[in-house]
Amino acid sequence: MKKLHLLAIVALIMMGLSGCEKAKVANDAAADVFVKSIVNAQGATVYTAIHSVFSYNKMTSVIAQAPAGQSLQLTNFENGGNSFFNEPVDADYSSTPPTAGSYSYKVTFDDGEEKTFTNALSSATLLPANITSLAKNASGDSVYISWNAITNTHAYQLKVMKGTTQAYYRPAFQDGNVPQLINLRIGLPTSDFANTGSGTYTFEITGLLFETTAYDYIQAISSATKDIEL
């Protein structure tokens, strides 16, 4: 999905594309594959692979290939040519995580040059957060969300949606407590959502696990949501 793709781009390394040949910046790209886990309508945790490729040079197509050989044509984000991704549907999720191993990405750049990039996927996954509470305070001027900490999570993100409109977004943040908290809690003034009016709001907690402590490429994410009337 587009919002998830933007999350992936934020995590990708900001490449310093250097080296010139005949006054032309070399074609280069950053490819990332990671596992996303959610709880489906039946209450089971299910998984899929998310692919994202970013380049400062425009691309015309990107084909992802799994270790077993399956290929997938990635979507050109808003036809801009700089970002390609896959948008999973319910049928793409499985009770077992995607195959670990080296994934390859065949990129065709705007000038016709073709290059292949790779990114490795391990077997590590994250469980979706258990949201224990989502409620307004007694005065009704704030709403609080609480959830149990996710094992092995490096960071969290919080997004609030009203239908298809994003009402609030908090980028990646860490639990800096020592020892880390067992339960986490965030409070937001309801005035933060004044521009989107009353109605049903969906709070989404995303857990992030990065490949290394450089916190650039993503290894796994998980997503959990809960609704509230405001």
Image (spheres, rainbow, N blue to C red):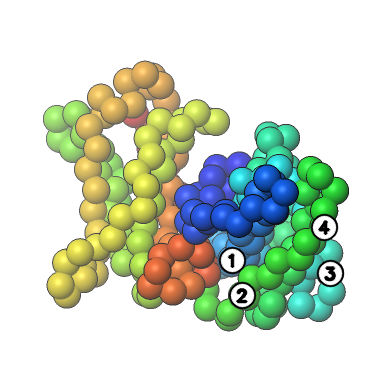
Is residue 170 rendered to the left or right of residue 46? left
Compared with residue 68, is residue 215 higher up or lower down, i.e. above or below? Answer: above
Residue 70 badge: 3
User: Going from the N terminus, do you reach mark 1 or mark 4 first?
Assistant: 1
User: Going from the N terminus, do you reach mark 4 or mark 3 first?
Assistant: 3
Q: Position of residue 158 (x, y in %)?
A: 37, 47
Q: Is residue 117 visible?
A: yes
Write down the residue under mark 2: 121
Which residue corresponds to the image point at 33% horizontal and 26% vertical from the top-left?
193
Compared with residue 104, is residue 143 higher up or lower down, i.e. above or below? Answer: above
> Label 2 sits on what residue type?
Leu
Is residue 145 rendered to the left or right of residue 97? left
The answer to which quarter of the image holds residue 78 is top right
> Label 1 sits on what residue type?
Phe
The answer to which quarter of the image holds residue 136 is top left
User: How far separated are the C-alphas under marks 4 and 3?
Assistant: 19 Å
User: How far separated are the C-alphas under marks 2 and 1?
Assistant: 6 Å
Compared with residue 226, is residue 68 higher up or lower down, i.e. above or below? Answer: below
Residue 114 badge: 4
User: Going from the N terminus, do you reach mark 3 or mark 1 first?
Assistant: 1
Residue 69 badge: none
Write down the residue under mark 1: 34
Q: Is residue 53 visible?
A: no
Q: Marks 2 and 1: CB-CB under 8 Å?
A: yes
Is residue 102 rendered to the left or right of residue 194? right
